[in-house]
């Protein structure tokens, strides 16, 4: 297939134009990846070496889809184009340049729950509250560029500098890195080594979802493309990752830092029906500060179907939505694989998935990144973390991060003070935590106030001994029992690796499944996931559940007015992403009340005086969708109208 087969209009211009830098402002469903792939195809047909082309995507799923589309062009070399996430590229560069080895670092990444122990150990005077330390940790991963206007690279504030130093000491002692650290490390390497071959690796750099890059990632892209051509594609209205200091201004103000920027636009939505396009435009115009042309429905697009419904409570919501899905599947209106259910909380998603399965509808949920959530200070709430940590130590008894976590589980302080004594002993005597604990357990060495650490270590030794002979499914069953709800996601991931595996293989499969989840696109079951996960996906029918204040939008009550407004705008962009997934039908679902205990567990602000039941109201975003939004119907009325 020639690169321009079937191409016309703006998409052809984007693929064909020879300018650098090129900025393409797009909207949802406008075919930006399609245009990006064709641009890469043109370069290949013109003789550019495939390994000299870099295509950066935001997720592994997007990278796999892009590689698939490149292969479908059947152009020589398409399979050799470098396509992937920026983090995977950075890991490759740092390994190739032996940066880890030369700087004495170990590329053992921390998992999200393990960061909690790191933050507890950084509880030094003057470094702030846990929330403030978490924010500093994210700023460290963004190379200390919190704002689009800041230069990435170095902490300027004295407290930031102290935090930076303490953090690196902890990571070095525990022989670990942060995944987010890959970007600053690669940026530092390229800046400080101008003669390095990696700076001249690519003649063409194409970046998808540019609005989701923070300032450090943007500068890294500039360094990789400074000897070649740069093309970026993105949508400020789909910028939803401010937690890592990515801002819509990154793409909106790109021209201010890149002279000669040539602009193109893709605003014709090929995915959504007319009504959804109108509702989405009405919603997003409530955000200020970013001027983007409104999305346009494709000429001839059908009107579409939008339903707005409210239920008495989450249980009724799950049962009612499941009934609708079953009826529509049985009537041949939609196939299971063409239905997406988007939920702001995992518990809502699990309830809907279970209700679907009770209706004999095949459904799978994709909340694996939450599989290891829980409070490590409460053993009843961190069973998945404990089991995974035990697996890690079974695979590598010298893993210092896992040992730190094991020693702290179940303590209100995560045994920070006692562990600090152990760490100081190790540093003063050039020994490992495990070796020191062996000495303490045998009585050969005494350290005051470390008795609880020794007891935890003895329990660890017993637990490892009971598991060391197990392999395959027997090992998975022992660690993640089939009758435990907390083990469900982990067992699902373990089921993908066959029957013959050991601790190391199981641990790696779970780590990848949790931290780098892949969302299948060609499936024969209903997919249930978070709103964030839906980005880049589409389906005939999209159901957004939990459209209630406190969940959509969720605003942190502890932040100031300016940050509250920023959070509100990002939550609006997230909702915009969710409602622009359907090709035919959109359902917006809310509840009138939530059991108070369930509301607490989902971190939903509650109202009302009832001790067991909290009142809830529909999300403010529905009122922002304009006069074309259909009226809200009660669940039982709606089910009757749609024949369910």
Image: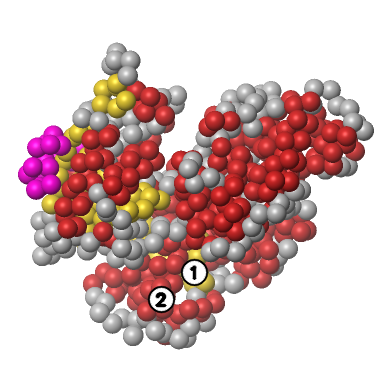
Q: Give the quarter of the figure containing the N terminus.
A: bottom left
Q: Is residue 639 part of the magenta span, yes or no?
A: yes
Name the residue at the top extreme: 609
Residue 348 position within the rendered picture, expressed as x and y whole percent measured from the top left? 33, 39
Say which of 598 and 89 sits in front: 598
Name the residue at the left extreme: 641
Residue 641 position within the rendered picture, expressed as x and y whole percent measured from the top left? 7, 44
Please tell me the numbered disc located at residue 70.
Answer: 2
The answer to whether one can see residue 182 in this image is no
Say if mark 2 contacts mark 1, CB within 8 Å: yes
Numbered disc 2: secondary structure: helix
Please tell me the numbered disc located at residue 432.
Answer: none
Q: Please identify the quarter of the rendering in which residue 64 is found.
A: bottom left
Say which of 80 and 3 sits in front: 80
- Asked if residue 619 is positioned above or below residue 584 in the image, the reply reads above
Residue range (magenta): 622-644
Residue 194 position within the rendered picture, expressed as x and y whole percent measured from the top left? 67, 64
Q: Please identify the quarter of the rendering in which residue 227 is found.
A: bottom right
Relative horizontal placement of residue 223, taking residue 265 as reference (left or right): right
Mark 2 crowdedness (10 Å alpha carbons): few <14, some 14-19, many ≥20: many
Q: Residue at x 58, y 25 (%)?
A: 129
Q: Which residue is mark 1?
A: 83
Relative horizontal placement of residue 313, taking residue 559 as reference (left or right): left
Mark 1 crowdedness (10 Å alpha carbons): few <14, some 14-19, many ≥20: many
Q: Residue at x 27, y 35 (%)?
A: 315
- Asked if residue 83 is positioned above or below residue 425 in the image, the reply reads below
Q: Residue at x 22, y 54 (%)?
A: 541
Residue 162 position within the rendered picture, expressed as x and y whole percent measured from the top left? 70, 33
Marks 2 and 1 sit apart, C-alpha to C-alpha, by 10 Å
Q: Earlier in the sequence, mark 2 or mark 1?
A: 2
């Amino acid at each position: 297939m020639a690169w321009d087969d079937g191409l016309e209009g703006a998409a052809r211009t984007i693929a064909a134009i020879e300018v650098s830098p090129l900025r393409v402002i797009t909207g949802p469903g406008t075919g930006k990846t399609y245009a990006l792939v064709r641009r890469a195809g043109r370069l290949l047909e013109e003789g550019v070496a495939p390994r000299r082309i870099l295509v950066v995507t935001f997720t592994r799923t997007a990278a796999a889809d892009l590689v698939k589309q490149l292969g479908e062009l059947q152009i020589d070399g398409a399979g050799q184009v470098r396509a992937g996430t920026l983090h995977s590229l950075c890991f490759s560069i740092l390994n190739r340049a032996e940066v880890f080895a030369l700087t004495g670092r170990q590329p053992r990444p921390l998992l999200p729950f393990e960061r909690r122990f790191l933050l507890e150990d950084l509880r030094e005077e003057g470094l702030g509250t846990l929330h403030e330390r978490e924010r500093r940790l994210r700023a460290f991963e963004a190379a200390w560029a919190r704002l689009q206007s800041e230069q990435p690279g170095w902490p300027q504030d004295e407290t930031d500098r102290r935090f930076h130093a303490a953090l690196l000491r902890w990571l070095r002692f525990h022989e670990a890195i942060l995944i987010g650290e890959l970007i600053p490390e690669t940026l530092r390497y390229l800046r400080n080594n101008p003669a390095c071959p990696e700076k001249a690796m690519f003649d063409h750099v194409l970046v998808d979802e540019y609005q989701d890059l923070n300032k450090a990632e943007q500068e890294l892209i500039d360094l990789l493309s400074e000897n070649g051509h740069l093309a970026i594609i993105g949508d400020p209205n789909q910028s939803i990752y401010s937690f890592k200091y990515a801002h819509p201004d990154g793409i909106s103000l790109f021209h201010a830092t890149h002279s000669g920027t040539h602009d193109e636009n893709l605003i014709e939505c090929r995915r959504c029906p007319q009504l959804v396009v109108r509702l989405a435009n009405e919603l997003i115009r409530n955000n200020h500060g970013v001027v983007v042309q409104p999305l346009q429905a494709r000429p001839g697009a059908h009107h579409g179907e939008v339903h707005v419904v409210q239920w008495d409570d989450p249980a009724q919501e799950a049962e009612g939505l499941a009934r609708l899905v079953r009826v529509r599947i049985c009537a041949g209106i939609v196939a299971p694989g063409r239905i997406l259910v988007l939920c702001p909380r995992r518990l809502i998603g699990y309830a809907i998935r279970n209700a679907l399965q009770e209706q004999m509808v095949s459904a799978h949920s994709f909340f694996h990144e939450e599989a290891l959530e829980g409070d490590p200070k409460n053993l009843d709430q961190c069973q998945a973390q404990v089991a995974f940590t035990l697996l890690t130590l079974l695979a590598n008894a010298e893993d210092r991060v896992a040992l730190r976590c094991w020693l702290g589980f179940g303590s209100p302080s995560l045994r920070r003070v006692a562990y600090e004594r152990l760490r100081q002993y190790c540093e003063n005597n050039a020994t490992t935590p495990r070796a020191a604990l062996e000495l303490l357990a045998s009585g050969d060495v005494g350290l005051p106030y470390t008795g609880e650490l020794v007891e935890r270590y003895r329990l660890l030794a017993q637990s490892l001994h009971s598991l060391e002979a197990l392999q395959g499914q027997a090992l998975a069953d022992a660690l993640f029992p089939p009758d435990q709800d907390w083990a469900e996601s982990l067992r699902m991931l373990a089921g993908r690796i066959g029957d013959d595996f050991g601790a190391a293989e199981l641990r790696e499969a779970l780590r990848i499944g949790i931290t780098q989840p892949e969302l299948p696109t060609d499936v024969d079951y209903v997919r249930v996931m978070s709103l964030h996960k839906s980005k880049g996906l589409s389906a005939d029918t999209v159901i957004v559940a939990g459209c209630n204040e406190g969940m959509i939008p969720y605003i942190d009550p502890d932040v100031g007015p300016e940050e509250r407004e920023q959070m509100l705008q990002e939550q609006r962009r997230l909702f915009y992403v969710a409602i622009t997934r359907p090709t035919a039908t959109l359902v917006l679902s809310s509840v009138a009340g939530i059991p108070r205990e369930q509301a607490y567990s989902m971190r939903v602000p509650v109202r009302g005086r009832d001790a067991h039941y909290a009142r809830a109201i529909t999300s403010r975003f529905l009122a922002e969708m304009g006069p074309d939004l259909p009226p809200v119907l009660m669940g039982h009325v709606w089910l009757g109208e749609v024949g369910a």
